[in-house]
Amino acid sequence: MDWSLALVSQGIETTIERPAAGGSWALLVPASESERALKTLRQYHVENRDFPWRQQLPWPETHFDWASALWIGALMVVYWISGQNADILNGGIMDSAKVVSGQSWRVFTAMTLHADLAHLAANLSIGIVLFGLAMGQYGTGTGLLAAYLAGAGGNVTSLLLNAKPFQGLGASGMIMGALGLLAAQSLTARQRAGKSLKQLLVGVVAGVMLFVLFGLAPGTDMAAHLGGFVTGLIIGAVLARLPAAWARSAKVNFASGVIFVALVTATWRLAFDHR
C-alpha cells in the first residue's frame, strides 16, 4: 500500500492484487510504466530510509468525567439567577477597586458569572470538554478544585497586569487552568518512564498551542487566560509528583470536592453579605 501511494503520487496507476492461497501480494502497474515505477520506488526508499512511518505510540489512558456536566449546569443556573437579580452580578463581579479594598472573594465568585448568553455558550462549549478531561485525569474532586484554583490564579494575574479600574467575569480563566492541568499530565511518573525530555515536553507544547488558539482571542481578558493556564501548569506539575494511587484515591477526591464546595459557598456567602 505504501508503494501504491508513492506511485499514484507520481501519476502511475496501480492495482493491488490479493494473493491466492499460499501466494504473495502483488502491485500491478501498466507495462509501459514499469521502468518509471521501479525508479520511483527506488527513490522512495532512498528518501525514506530509516524514517519511522509506523511506530508504537504509548497513548496515555484518557478518561472523560461526565461529572463536569454538573458544574456546567451550575454555571447555567447562576447565569439565569443573575439575570433575574442584578445585585448578584454586582456582588460577584471582579471589580478591581473593590478587590483592592478588601473584597478578595470576587476573585472566586467572578468565575461563576457571565455577561450574556453568547459569553456563557462560548465558555461552556469548550469548558465541558476540558473540565471533563481534567477531572478524568486527576479525579472528579481534585481536578475540579485544581481548575477552580487555577482560575482564581488567572483572576489575580488579571488584577496585577490589567490597567485599573476594570471589571471582569467569566469561567475562561478556569477553563485555561483546566488546559494547563492537561498539558502538565505528560510530566506524570507513568509518562516519564523511558521518555526523553523532548518527548515529555510534547504534551506541554501542545497545550501551549491550544492556549494560543483559544486563550489569546482579541477582546478577551488575555491576562486572566495566561494566569489561569500557567497556574494550571504549576498545579498539574505538583500533582504529577504525587503517587497516582494517592492523588486519585476516593478519600482525596472526596476531600477536594468538599473544599471546592466550601470555597464556592463561602465566597458567595461573603458576596451576599456585602451587597
Image (tube, rainbow, N blue to C red):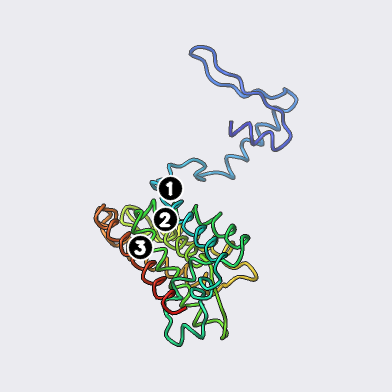
Amino acid type assigned to the residue bearing label 1 in the image: Trp
What amino acid type should be assigned to the residue bearing mark 3? Val
Q: Quadrant of residue 71?
A: bottom left
Given the current orientation, which residue lies at the most extreme bottom position? 101
| 210 to the left or right of 187 | right
The span from disc 3 to disc 1 (Cα, nearest Å) is 18 Å
Q: Is residue 33 above or below residue 166?
A: above
Residue type, numbered disc 2: Ala
The residue tagged 3 is 261
Q: From the viewer's side, name the closer residue of 179 and 82.
A: 82
- Looking at the image, tell me whether mark 3 or mark 2 is earlier in sequence order: 2
| Residue 46 image offset from top left, x and y in percent | 58, 43
Q: Disc 3 to disc 2, how far (Cα)? A: 18 Å
> Is the residue under label 1 in contact with that under label 3 (CB below 8 Å)?
no
Horizontal and vertical percent for residue 124? 54, 57
Q: Nearest the camera: 209 or 249?
A: 249
Instruction: Tell which of 135 and 108 is nearer to you.
Output: 108
Q: Residue at x 35, y 63 (%)?
A: 261
**Residue under label 1:** 66
- Name the front one of labels 3 and 2: 3
Which residue is at the front of the view, 134 or 168?
168
Looking at the rendered structure, the secondary structure element under dot 1 is loop
**Image quarter hosting the N terminus:** top right
Q: How many marks?
A: 3
Q: Can you identify the residue that label 2 sits on?
A: 134
**x then y, percent, for residue 158:** 51, 77
Left/right of residue 262 with respect to residue 163 in the rendered view: left
Q: CA distance from mark 2 to mark 1?
A: 11 Å
**Label 2, residues with CA under 10 Å away: few <14, some 14-19, many ≥20:** many
